[in-house]
Image: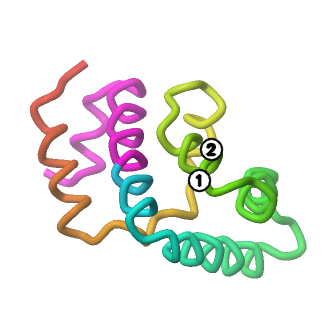
Amino acid sequence: MSLQQQEQGRGHEWIDQRSLALDKAIAAKLRARPELLQCATETLQNWIRQRQPTVPQVMLEWQEILTTWSFDKITALLTSSEPEPTRLRQSSPFCGILTQQERMKIFQEYESFRT
């Protein structure tokens, strides 16, 4: 069964909680290696270039966050379960920060959770 098929049987809350767990792991990794923040910035810049001339608003929001917010405020955003960070998490430019092994560990932890 594919990941997409498995997720169809789970609610949005379950997916949001798993995404939050991924972002918490990303925040921890960024705190250990702050230079990785540049990877998210580069990913976002590539996405924006690919989407010209009609860049989605969420990408512009991420651009403002990554260029104007403090490091601590960014990591706090990543670890927040509030509605706004949850919405932003759906288009996160931090997708390349965790290794496949790190991501799979979190996915496996969430396999036993059901809504």
SS category of the residue bearing label 1: loop
- Residue 4 located left or right of residue 111: right
Q: Which residue is mark 1?
A: 91
Magenta residue span: 1-24
Decide whether residue 113 is among the magenta residues.
no
* Nearer to the camera, 10 or 113: 113
Tag 1: amino acid: Ser
Q: Quadrant of residue 28?
A: bottom left
Please give the count of numbered marks on the rendered protein.
Answer: 2
Decide whether residue 11 is among the magenta residues.
yes
For the residues labelled 1 and 2, say whether their Cβ atoms are less than 8 Å apart: yes
Point 62% across, 44% down: residue: 88
SS category of the residue bearing label 2: helix
Q: Is residue 70 above or below residue 47?
A: above
- Residue 53 located left or right of residue 95: right
Q: Which residue is mark 2?
A: 88
Farthest residue, direction right: 53
* Nearer to the camera, 39 or 1: 39
Within-10-Å neighbours for mark 2: few <14, some 14–19, many 20+: some
Q: Picture coordinates of residue 20 (x, y %)?
A: 41, 39
Q: Picture coordinates of residue 10 (x, y %)?
A: 28, 28
Q: Quadrant of residue 70?
A: bottom right
Point 59% across, 41% down: residue: 77
Q: Picture coordinates of residue 95 (x, y %)?
A: 46, 65
Q: Specify the principal SS of the magenta part.
A: helix
- Residue 82 located left or right of residue 21: right
Farthest residue, direction top: 115
- Residue 105 located left or right of residue 22: left
Tag 2: amino acid: Leu
Quarter containing the C terminus: top left
